[in-house]
Image: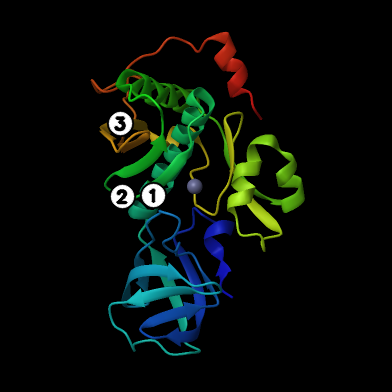
Amino acid sequence: MTRKLYWEEPYSKEFAAKVISIEGESVVLDQTLFYPRGGGVACDTGTLNASKVLETTKTDDNILHTLDTPGSLHVGDKVTGHVDWERRHRLMKMHTAGHLLSSLFYSRANCRITGNQIDVDRSRMDFNLESFDRSRIEGYVAEANDLIRKDATVKTYFLGREEALKLPDMVKLAEAAPPAEAQLRIVEIEGVDRQADGGLHVSHLTEIGQIQLLKLENKGKTNRRLYYDLVAKASTGAPDSALLISTKPPLEAEKEKMGRF
Ligand SMILES: [Zn+2]
């Protein structure tokens, strides 16, 4: 089983490892910083020694690094890995932004995320919402940007499955995780959101910059699709895009709903 260095040090860019097996055209290491594709999140790329890592995927036990020069590495070889940091950091920001948006959709409209694609150029989120109300959805995005401006720490930790199941809002997430997992990895945006998740995230909301709503699509009776991108934070602190809409402070009742953790 590959040690997941990316969980331990998500901000590291370089690591040393040893090749423990070759599976087809992919290399398995004893430990890796390369985050594998999964759960709708794009993977890391970079280099292992002189080879390019084109793709990182996973099986039940292993993380597979697909190289541009298959056959160039052998079992026992020592390697130095470099993660394409620009890509990785952007994926971390996109992923945390997705959690922030999903928590607002959940707390404000009680809608569930039915699918997502976290990627470098833009990300996508599917959710079920009865009415297709653009201004309401734009309001949630603006609210997410307010929370980013206010900042919050994002932390990860493990909780025993039983313990996690006792938390009211964790039930749906815990149920979605494979029953064999005794420990659930939790990603928590302090005071805002807590989810069982294996992904990589920024440590502070302000790193995200600002969320830009790109497109909204109607995908049937209750299915909606939202595309978003990230833009750097405006230096003045003022919204730098016509798409960013200012919102009034949440109503008291809504504030209470927000305090679900
Ligand atoms: Zn996630």
Q: Does 53 sit above or below residue 152?
A: below
Quarter holding the C terminus is top right
Please report whichever mark, 2 or 1, sits nearer to the chain's N-terminal start. Answer: 1
Residue 3 coordinates in the image, percent (x, y):
58, 70
* Residue 120 numbered tag: 2
Is residue 74 among the parts visible in the rendering?
Answer: yes
Residue 116 is left or right of residue 62, and the answer is left
Which of the labelled discs sits on residue 91, or is there none? Answer: 1
Tell me which label, 1 or 3, sits earlier in the chain: 1
- Seen at 34% across and 54% down, the residue is 87
3D distance between C-alphas at marks 2 and 3: 14 Å
Give above or below for 248 relative to 234. Answer: above
Residue 171 image offset from top left, x and y in percent: 65, 42
Which is nearer the eye, 174 or 214? 174
Q: CA distance from mark 1 to mark 3?
A: 15 Å
Q: Nearer the viewer, residue 127 or 117?
A: 127
Q: Secondary structure at mark 1?
A: helix
Disc 1 within 8 angstroms of ligand 1 (CB): no
Query: Label 3, on which residue?
Result: 212
Q: Is residue 146 above or below residue 101?
A: above
Say whether residue 93 is left or right of residue 187. Answer: left
Q: Amino acid at mark 2?
A: Val
Residue labelled 2 has its Cβ within 8 Å of some atom of ligand 1: no
| Callout 2–callout 1 Cβ contact below 8 Å | yes
Q: Which quadrant does the N terminus fall into?
A: bottom right
* CA distance separating discs 2 and 1: 6 Å
Q: Amino acid at mark 3?
A: Gln
Query: Which structural element holds mark 3?
Result: strand
Using a 10 Å C-alpha cutoff, classify the residue at mark 1 as few (fewer than 14 neighbours), some (14 to 19) or many (20 or more).
Answer: many
Question: Residue shown at 28%/44% (left/top)?
Answer: 122
